[in-house]
Amino acid sequence: METLGEGLKGQIIKRLMIRITSLFFISLLSFICLPAQQITGTVYDAKFDRPLEKVNLVVEGAGVGAVSDKDGGFRILGLSVGKYLLKATLVGYLAWEKEIEISGNGVEGFLIYLQPTNITLNNDFVITARRIETSGFTSPEPITVVNSLQLEQEAPRSTPEALIGATGVFLQKTNHGGGSPFIRGLTGNQNLLMIDGVRLNNATFRYGPNQYLNTIDQLIVDKLEVVRGAGSVLYGSDAMGGVINVLTHIPEFSNSGLDVGGNIFAGWMSGDMEKTGRAEVNLSGEQIAFSGGFTYKDFGDIVAGGDIGKLTPTGYTGYSGDAKLRVKLPANNELIIAWQYDKQEGVPRYDKIINGYTKYHFNPQIRQLAYARLKATHRNKWFKQVILTGSYKQSDETRIKQKEGSAKILNETDLVNTFGGTVEVNSFPSETWHFTSGVEYYFDKVSSETIETEDGNSINKRGYYPDGATSSSIAIFTSHTIDVNSFSFILGGRFNAHKIKAEDNAFGNVDVGPSAVVGSFSAMYHLDDHLNLIASVYSAFRSPNINDLGSFGTFNYGIEVPNPYLRPEKSLNYELGLKAKFERLSGSFFLYRNQLDDLIDRVEAQYNGLDSIDGEKVYKKENFARAYIQGLEAEVHYKFVSRLSAYGNITYTYGQNETGDEPMRRIPPLNGKIGLYYKCKSGFWGRIEFLSAGEQDRLSSGDQSDSRIHDGGTPGWHVLNLRAGYNWKWIEITAGLNNIFDEAYRMHGSGVDGYGRSFRLAVRVGF
């Protein structure tokens, strides 16, 4: 009966997917036959009357837009006669919007003037919150954005380090090649990582901190969007703490002729801690645009603050390549084809090497991604925009381990191939109702092996995971936004079915099919044009993956054996928030409580009647815990004068394991930052930031067993950083002084200490 039910569910979802895909092609063909109007114009800086490039223009409710070229020009196609709301945004300028009316001849020569501002908070358009580009201020979700200007000025060493100090995000680093963000007290496979809307999480994403965000080259990132709080309705499993979407650079079209350009980047850090170089080329035509590049990275050992000094070994090398092609199709449709490759070599686990291992390296760590995305825009209100995405990604990881005093060397290799497909429909039935619906499918296949070598003899053993294990996920979702007078209501739902199969002679076969239904509801009251009051409740889930069901091997304080009898983790979130946006002040404040049930955690166990193997205690995972996490997140940005502003944020998290009557594991301490930013018209800018974290002495039993956490807890710390830069035509220079007072500190739960006093220089030359 269970098999019949699962088969029926699969048939229903497959039929829906076929129908939606068919409707997409029918709507695309019918659209090509219909005439369309356009808007052309130019965007200027209102203060200096100079054209602005890279301005993002969106026609709300039409699913179309454009980006201005180097002369400020833009062309928006695919519109019918009627009234629309045109919006324009650019980092460093106030958001602009105006209602326009399109006649039979379209709109030509439209002029837009943007006012400069130092305030960026609540001034961004975001895509992750609703799966369609919308104003972050009018979205009920708490959203943290690290925009392109911040990335250029900070010039972070890695993608994870770009999130240090971001509102509601706390970064843990097990090793220098890692960087695992905590969102609302959760990390690892309880948060969802994405690249350009494609899932980075796969079937082997492990419980607790991981290194996978660091496999994305920070020099191809255009923006980081963090949705704090559950995102399972729109994005599925794992999105219990939040969603991080890494948006990479998109090549832009030219409004006339072919433009050829590019840039060369070099980054250097004192103490031989970094040498980074990148070359990039951009081609912009009227119908085709292309960008591609290559990055090389050589990171030396960390030189920590105070008396700690150099942490050996922590350094590693790596290189990345990327290419993206963008093609205009008839009737304002668009195709994007992208490829990314990242390889890291000799990445050490410093915390293991100083605690009983001669060798413990990731060598290599490889990530590949290829995807194609077709966007079709239609005047049919039910199929205003249809997006098809097909993706392939590969994760290839080898761990080399050797314990002190042992001649035995283990080479553990895990290869995961993932295929994905999404059909997404954005509908605008009326001015007060729009919704996003879709079907999503992912399939993972895992190859895993362990080679044990001793005295020149090699033995093939069971891998960390069952070799040949597969995991599939299929889902259907919808999310609706309804405006009623001063209220906006957002409600949605998702059904997700999973199938995991593994043949395991050592521990028994796995054949499970967990499923989940989740929902969300938010109410936003627009007090006026400057204040939005928000109340939300939403559920989320995390389906057990192959890492949960089939892993066999060491972790930081023991050895784990498989347990094939696990259920999905579940959460129920409650949230109250306020967003403010004035000319001189912008901010947000959120209170939340996340009730967690059926949490999967490690418990002491036995293997073949033994409670330890090679001196390591045996553990397995079980659904046994009920817990809650609650806290607050606040941020503010204030403009003193036109070129001087102040900003800050604070995050408090409290987690309690109700089943074990103890604190939850790895809960971040109270943390935040304050800063001053100055920018003058000559192109010079400077900022000073004070980052701080309190002591964390609320430790779980797992924390107390973790060698990465000091006895009694992690001490509080305070770090002062200085950044300055200069932009002139084709050259950008950024200089930074980290940890000015050479504070010795460690992010809670990390296996390495933070940088000591150090100098960093980054130069970008365009052509």
Image: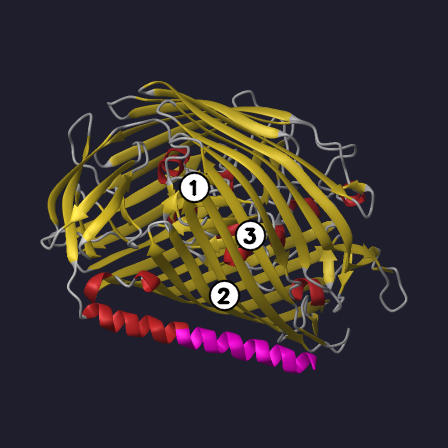
Residue beneath label 1, please? Answer: 275
- Tell me whether circle 1 and circle 2 mark residues in contact (CB < 8 Å): no
Check the image and tell me how it is coloured.
secondary structure
**For this view, does 212 lie left or right of residue 678?**
right
* Foreground of the two, 387 or 205: 387
Mark 1 and mark 2 lie on one chain; the one further toward the N terminus is: 1
Q: Which numbered mark, 1 or 2, is in the foreground of this view? A: 2
At which x and y percent is residue 666?
Answer: 69, 41
Q: Residue 394: which numbered mark, if any?
A: 2
Number of residues whose C-alpha sits closer than 10 Å to that of mark 3, classed few (under 14), some (14–19) or many (20 or more): many
Q: Which numbered mark, 2 or 3, is in the foreground of this view? A: 3
* Foreground of the two, 641 or 595: 595
**Residue 168 makes an appearance in the image:** no
Which SS class for mark 1?
A: strand
- At a point 62% along the width and 41% down the height, the residue shown is 312
Mark 2 and mark 3 lie on one chain; the one further toward the N terminus is: 2
What is the spatial separation of the Cα atoms under label 2 and label 3, in whole angstroms? 32 Å
Amino acid beneath label 3: Ser
- At a point 66% along the width and 36% down the height, the residue shown is 748
- At a point 51% along the width and 68% down the height, the residue shown is 442
Q: Which residue extends farthest right? A: 609
* Magenta residue span: 1-19
* Total marks placed: 3
Amino acid beneath label 2: Gln
Mark 1 and mark 3 lie on one chain; the one further toward the N terminus is: 1
Which SS class for mark 3?
A: strand
Residue beneath label 3, please? Answer: 520
Q: Which numbered mark, 1 or 3, is in the foreground of this view? A: 3
**Residue 574 makes an appearance in the image:** yes
**For this view, does 252 lie left or right of residue 234?**
left
Quarter of the image where the N terminus is located:
bottom right
